[in-house]
Amino acid sequence: MRLPVDRWNPEAEIIARAARALREGRLVAFPTETVYGLGADGLDEAAVRAIYRAKGRPSDNPLILHLADVAGAERVAFVDDRARRLMDLFWPGPLTLVLPARCGVVPAVTRGGLETVALRMPSHPVALALIEAAGLPVAAPSANRSGRPSPTEAEAVEEDLGEAVAIILDGGSTDVGVESTVVDATGPSLLLLRPGALPLERIEETEGVVDLPRKGEGRRSPGTRYRHYAPDRPLLLWDETLQWESLQGAVGYIGIEAPSRPVAVEVRFRTVEDYARGLFSALRHLERSGVDLIVAQWPRREGLGLALRDRLLRASGRG
Ligand code: TXA
Ligand code: MG
């Protein structure tokens, strides 16, 4: 059931109803500042299994626990000084920290069998109100079927998950449009597991250089092993190797600059922030519009451009 909520001032009655559903072990989809999440009680094994089932997600791909404060983080993980500093700087907001888990508290299914757990405190008023009202850590992956573009509006959640969710809180479009930045903070240096909504430059301002995982390296995010964000037709990147003249069939285009030749359907953005905000819904829109292939402009490697490049690369099947 889809329930509209006031984004800035969520109605207490609706939030209480959704929080009750979570406490009863059911699934609730909700908006965050990044994308919509598919939430369940993160400490309830059966409820967490229902998330994996609904998404068709491999069980070794762990979930993020969403919290309403730092105290909530300390109940499920070991939080050292560096992690506390990062939380003070960037929470609430789109930074997910991977920390050593309190394995007696957080079930192995939530952790995908690892001894670490990913934590984040979202800044979206609806997400915060829900987590507070439920009074538990809310496990929530993006609310898409596994491998599909993440949902940035409630309609996309309904399209992918419909019946599997008890309640979809509809708070309109999300703000950033790409998922949180995931950083492994278990080792001596910080490691970027997934570029995302918090630009890497912001973290490096206070923490110095954050490592990037090398190909084949052990300390990686399990999620990066799977094909992701894929529209159901070929996606090509517009870089110096793309040969516009040789493209066959109806072309859909997304990007900031005008495409090099006329295309069947075009989605244009003004800035890299707009591009990030609109990418996933543009991919879904282009699928519906019946184009044969999609060309996407390859953004520069700075700010949200880093996250965009990662999502586009994976949507193209090359990531
Ligand atoms: O913005 C977001 O992060 C959204 C909203 C709903 O909060 N959530 C989200 O969740 O994108 P999901 O499940 O789609 O992506 C979580 C990523 C995956 O790549 C997963 O492998 C990684 O975080 N992850 C989770 N726990 C981990 C852990 N213990 N160690 C390493 N990576 C982990
Ligand atoms: Mg996801």
Image (tube, rainbow, N blue to C red):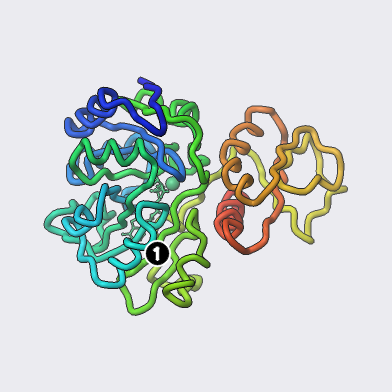
Q: Position of residue 19 (x, y in %)?
A: 23, 32
Q: Which residue is drawn at 40% across and 33% down?
A: 8
Q: Residues within 10 Å of mark 1 (few under 14, many from 20)?
A: many
Left or right, residue 252 beside residue 9: right
Quarter of image, res 134: top left
Quarter of the figure with the C terminus: bottom right
**Residue lying furthest left:** 104
Left or right, residue 197 beside residue 5: right
Q: Position of residue 311 (x, y in %)?
A: 56, 52
Quarter of image, res 279: top right
Say above or below: 306 vs 234.
below
Quarter of the figure with the N terminus: top left
Observer-nearest residue: 91 or 170?
91
The residue at label 1 has a CB less than 8 Å from ligand 1: no
Q: Which residue is drawn at 23% across and 45% down?
A: 42
Residue pointed to by mark 1? 183
Left or right, residue 294 beside residue 154: right
Q: Position of residue 273 (x, y in %)?
A: 60, 49
How many numbered marks, from 0 up? 1
Observer-nearest residue: 125 or 252?
125
* Three-letter code for the amino acid on which mark 1 is drawn: Val
**SS label for mark 1:** strand
Left or right, residue 295 beside residue 119: right
Say above or below: 98 vs 209.
above
Q: Where is residue 165 in the image (x, y as percent from the top left)?
A: 33, 28
**Residue lying furthest bottom:** 188
Observer-nearest residue: 89 or 180?
89
Q: Which residue is drawn at 37% across and 27% down?
A: 168
Q: Residue at x 31, y 57 (%)?
A: 118
